Image: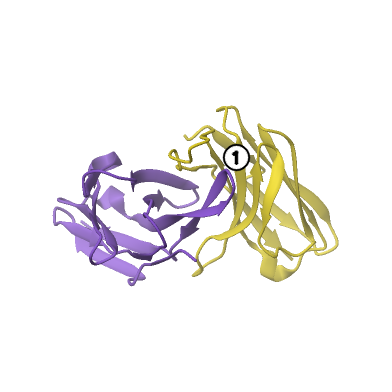
Chain colours: A purple, B yellow
Amino acid sequence: AQSVAQPEDQVNVAEGNPLTVKCTYSVSGNPYLFWYVQYPNRGLQFLLKYITGDNLVKGSYGFEAEFNKSQTSFHLKKPSALVSDSALYFCAVRDLAGPGYSTLTFGKGTMLLVSP
Amino acid sequence: ETGVTQTPRHLVMGMTNKKSLKCEQHLGHNAMYWYKQSAKKPLELMFVYNFKEQTENNSVPSRFSPECPNSSHLFLHLHTLQPEDSALYLCASRPKDSQLKQETQYFGPGTRLLVL
């Protein structure tokens, strides 16, 4: 079965500093990997995904993620954090659940807190 | 906004009540999902509907009953719930893609459910 691990419950960073939110995965076959963000009292919003191609994927709001096959990691990064980036971040991997459809398996989430 | 709407946004119900959650999308998506989000736990996939047919039921208790009358609407009928069922219930949808290359799910804002 596919799985993702987010080893940090919370990441604290000062505004203007670079941020990294970690994710490692375990899949059989080629990985399809995703990052979502959840702001308070909202649903999940899609940030970016890796399907194939360049290992560095660029997404919304200045976020990017680096796919590393040898380390089975897909860490989320941003060069300069904003206070408004404070939210809950989820890593996810595609699960080929059955013929013609798939599901996503999510990590437990990492709370990012950016201080002014 | 993702184009996926959920009503009501908040719901308080007693253990003997019957209520329904509604999810709606007019994005032309053909797959719809119900998730349960509890504090400190990963998102739990509950049900998957693909072309209006239920394709996955992740051992969800029978007090939760999904219904998908057409590809734009998804319901979750609730009956004799328990306090531990209190959570945020998220609906998501995914575009039609027979080659499973477009995996992105789009989430609604969720229904915050409190069972007393």
| Chain letter belonging to callout 1 | B
Percent position of residue A72, x then y:
29, 64
Say what secondary structure mark 1 lies in: strand
A21 and B101: which is toward the camera = B101
- Seen in the picture, residue B15 relative to A83 is either above or below; the reply is below
Q: Dot 1: within a 10 Å radius of its alpha carbon, few (fewer than 14), some, or many (20 or more) residues?
A: many
Q: Residue at x 38, y 51 (%)?
A: A32
| Residue A58 falls in image quadrant | top left
The image position of residue A5, as x and y in percent, is 38, 68
Quick one: A8 or B95, which is closer to the camera?
Answer: B95
Kind of residue indicated by mark 1: Ala
On the image, the x and y values in percent for residue A42 come to: 49, 47
Say which residue appears at 53% left-offset and 49% top-offset. Answer: A102
Q: Kindly identify which residue carries mark 1.
A: B31
Q: Residue A22's image quarter?
A: bottom left
Residue at image coords 69%, 40%: B74
Q: Nearer the viewer, residue A112 or A100?
A: A100
